[in-house]
Every structure is written in C-alpha cells, then in structure tokens.
Image (spheres, rainbow, N blue to C red):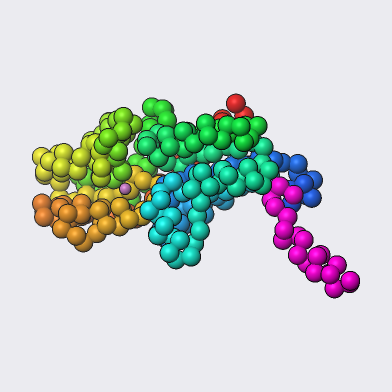
C-alpha cells in the first residue's frame, strides 16, 4: 500500500500538464502561445529559436509556450533523428486535448505568404475547439514593419565595411505568392537608406541576377552577404555562402567580387524578435 502511495507521489507531478502546474502555482492561466515557424533542422540555427522562446517567456509570463513547424520536410528530417516536432494542426489538437481555452498563434514567418495562410486556414477548422484562437501576423505585415526591420538589419552590417563595399541581403522570396512584393518593398527601403545595399531573393523578386548586374554596374569589388531570413540555415549556408558553382558567393567570385558572408539569422537579433512579439502583444490585448 505504502509503496503504491509513494509511487503515485513520485509519478503524479510528472503527469500534471502545464495548465495544472500553473493552477498549483496559483496562476489560473488557460492561455497558450503557439510559436509557428517554418522550422529548421540546423542545430546552430536553433539558437535563434531558443532566443525567441526566452524573450517570449520574459514578455508573457504564465503563458504556456509551444512550437509548431510548418515545413513537413523539416519535421520529417528531424523525426529521422528522433526529434519530434508538431505541425500546426497537431499542435492545435494537442492544445485542445490539454484543455487550453485561449490560443494565440504567432507566425514567425517573414511575410504573410503561403505558410502563413495555411495556418490561417487551419484556424477555421479549430474555431469550435477554443474560446479564442487568433493568428498573429508575421514580421513584415505593414510598410512600418518593413522600415523598422530594414533599419535594424542595416545596423547589423559589420562595422569594417567601407562605403564602397556592397551589401546584399538574402531574402527567401515567394515567386508565386502576392506577398512576394513585400521583398520588393524591403529592397526599396534598403536602397533608399544605403545606395550600396541591396536585397535579392532565392525564390522570388528581386532576383540575384538583377542585383549582380547592379553590382557590376557600380564596379563593386567586395560585397557583404547577410541573410534576410529568420535563421542562417540551409539557404544561407548553401545558396548564399556555399561552395557550389551557383551559390551567390561563387557567382560573385566569378565576377571578380570578393564576398564576406555574415552567418546570423534575423531571429538572432532581439530587436527583430521584438517586432514579432509586439504583433503578439497587440493580438493578445486586442
Ligand atoms: Co526555401
């Protein structure tokens, strides 16, 4: 008998879910924040996610904070390594199962593109599952967000850069989605602030070829390359700074332009994370 009680005492605390734990601590919170990202399989890039989570916990104490990865490819890749990440749908089902009433899903995407709209579509499927389920917009949701983000990212250019050195930010781009235009808006804001700084994208507009032509026109000899993506993951490592003949670095070298890659994702900068978290705060208090 005693042994059973001891076993129960040992086991029971682990069986408490976060909501019950909060209730025990006197916080009656049935609110959850779901951080929804494309995802990354890069252990180094994960630093950025840890940073977002830390800042979110500081800003929203008492909230349950969970993650969802929109990229099936990345979830599968991680599952093969034994790391289980949930899709937004799975994460919402789990939150429902665990009895959360209000769920605020913060999109950690850059633009309100395909991935973001998938999450928005999901929310109608779950509308009867919660008292409240709100999807909070991604980083660049207004021209003001674009200006702010660009200002922050321009301040991250290494200080040894001389005026004549070019800078190219690598955005993802989303060629088939109307939100691709936001990258063009960001490129405009960048060039307006610094006439030797540009933005090009991997899969949309502006294209790298356009920007390479501009650099050649300007007779640039050196270019700093910075990701305009949440993490310095596969695209930054391979398409931007990799050794393959079609990487930006190789294409620049081929054109006599020395390149200096800066391997730091946007989500590693607290000021950028705070834009996402400001969106979240507005969503929660609205
Ligand atoms: Co991609």
Q: Residue at x 46, y 53 (%)?
A: 48
Q: In this view, does 86 lie above or below 44?
A: above
Residue 158 in percent (x, y) is at 33, 51
Residue 69 in percent (x, y) is at 46, 49
Q: Residue at x 38, y 53 (%)?
A: 73
User: Is residue 170 among what the camera can see?
Assistant: yes
User: The C terminus is located in which quarter?
Assistant: top right
Name the foreground residue: 271 vs 22.
22
Residue 27 in percent (x, y) is at 76, 44
Q: In which quarter of the image is residue 146?
A: top left
- Residue 4 covered by magenta stretch: yes
Magenta stretch in the rendered image: 1-20
Q: Main secondary structure of the magenta part?
A: helix
Q: Residue at x 43, y 37 (%)?
A: 118
- Left or right: residue 152 versus residue 185 is right
Q: In this view, does 86 lie above or below 193?
A: below
Name the foreground residue: 50 vs 113.
113
Residue 9 in percent (x, y) is at 81, 65
Q: Is residue 267 above or below residue 194?
A: below
- Residue 73 covered by magenta stretch: no
Residue at the right extreme of this rendering: 1
Q: In which quarter of the image is residue 102?
A: top right
């Amino acid at each position: 008998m005693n042994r059973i009680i001891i076993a129960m005492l040992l086991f029971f605390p682990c069986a408490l879910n976060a909501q019950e734990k909060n209730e025990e601590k006197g916080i009656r919170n049935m609110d959850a924040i779901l951080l929804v990202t494309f995802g990354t399989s890069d252990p180094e890039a994960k630093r950025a996610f840890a940073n977002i989570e830390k800042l979110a916990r500081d800003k929203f104490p008492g909230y349950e904070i969970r993650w969802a990865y929109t990229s099936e490819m990345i979830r599968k890749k991680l599952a093969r390594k034994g790391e289980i990440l949930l899709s937004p749908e799975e994460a919402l089902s789990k939150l429902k199962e665990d009895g959360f009433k209000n769920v605020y899903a913060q999109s950690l995407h850059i633009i309100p593109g395909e991935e973001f709209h998938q999450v928005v579509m999901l929310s109608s499927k779950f509308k009867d599952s919660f008292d409240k389920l709100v999807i909070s917009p991604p980083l660049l949701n207004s021209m003001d967000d674009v200006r702010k983000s660009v200002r922050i990212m321009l301040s991250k250019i290494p200080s040894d850069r001389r005026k004549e050195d070019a800078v190219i930010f690598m955005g993802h781009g989303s060629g088939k989605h109307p939100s691709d235009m936001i990258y063009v808006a960001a490129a405009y804001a960048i060039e307006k602030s610094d006439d030797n700084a540009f933005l090009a994208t991997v899969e949309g507009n502006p294209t790298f070829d356009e920007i390479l032509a501009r650099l050649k026109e300007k007779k640039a000899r050196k270019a700093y390359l910075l990701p305009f993506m949440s993490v310095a993951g596969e695209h930054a490592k391979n398409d931007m700074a990799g050794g393959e003949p079609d990487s930006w670095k190789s294409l620049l070298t081929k054109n006599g332009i020395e390149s200096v890659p800066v391997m730091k994702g946007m989500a590693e900068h607290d000021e950028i994370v705070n834009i996402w978290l400001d969106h979240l705060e507005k969503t929660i208090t609205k």
